């Protein structure tokens, strides 16, 4: 039930603002249920910035409970042997580097397109040969809306 999203005290954009000040530009973000079935916000910043290649970058996850204020996420860095997270993060970084805009800018565009909605997942992706972002927004109409956004 996506209505649980409206229990969050912060938006994805507010999570970006908090995370990016200290940890770098985000390349993915999502609201999801954690292991205890509680709402969690995960933001994935790259410590070396989006202009640094994947081999020399630092991939991280900030995750925490967005239903309490202030949002106080825990930082986890992805390191070898965590090949699954490192491989996905490297792919995501490559898409971000070719998308022509940041994930935050894509979320801002989706939020503007559906201002009464709640952005709950934003990922770098591609459509045909174009890199961009897939942004999912839960609307007041109780439907999930998908936007493919490019720079």
Image (cartoon, grey):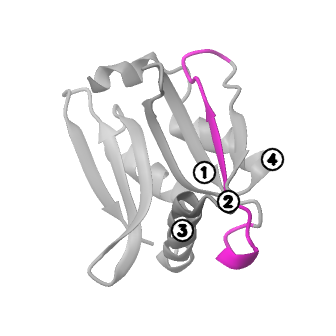
Q: Secondary structure at mark 2?
A: loop
Q: Secondary structure at mark 1?
A: strand
Whether the residues at callouts 2 and 4 have beta carbons within 8 Å, the answer is no
Number of labels in the image equals 4
Whether the residues at callouts 1 and 2 have beta carbons within 8 Å, the answer is yes
Near-viewer residue (63 or 13): 63
Q: Secondary structure at mark 4?
A: helix
Whether the residues at callouts 1 and 4 have beta carbons within 8 Å, the answer is no
Would you say residue 52 is visible in this rendering?
no
Q: Secondary structure at mark 3?
A: helix
Residue holding disc 4 = 22
Residue holding disc 3 = 87
Which residue is at 61% across, 37% downward? 15
Which residue is at 74% across, 63% downward? 58
Query: Magenta part of the protein: which range?
Result: 49-69
Upstream in sequence: badge 1 or badge 4? 4
Residue holding disc 2 = 59
Whether the residues at callouts 3 and 1 have beta carbons within 8 Å, the answer is no
Residue holding disc 1 = 44
Q: Determine the image quadrant of residue 49.
A: bottom right
Would you say residue 27 is visible in this rendering?
yes
Q: Position of residue 103 (x, y in %)?
A: 52, 58
Q: Looking at the image, is mark 3 or mark 2 nearer the viewer?
A: 3
Task: Bin the neighbour count of mark 2 within 10 Å (Cα to Cα): few under 14, some 14-19, many 20 and up.
Answer: many
Upstream in sequence: badge 3 or badge 1? 1
């Amino acid at each position: 039930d996506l209505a649980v999203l409206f229990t969050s005290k912060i938006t994805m954009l507010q999570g970006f603002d908090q995370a990016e000040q200290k940890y770098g530009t985000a390349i993915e973000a999502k609201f999801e249920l954690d292991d205890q079935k509680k709402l969690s916000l995960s933001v994935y910043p790259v410590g070396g910035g989006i202009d640094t290649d994947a081999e020399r970058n630092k991939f991280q996850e900030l995750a925490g409970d967005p239903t309490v204020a202030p949002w106080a996420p825990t930082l986890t860095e992805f390191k070898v042997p965590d090949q699954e997270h490192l491989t996905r993060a490297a792919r995501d970084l490559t898409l971000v580097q070719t998308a022509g805009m940041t994930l935050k800018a894509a979320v801002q565009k989706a939020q503007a397109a559906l201002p009464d909605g709640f952005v709950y997942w934003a990922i770098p992706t591609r459509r045909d040969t174009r890199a961009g972002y897939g942004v999912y927004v839960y609307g007041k109409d109780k439907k999930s809306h998908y936007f493919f956004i490019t720079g």
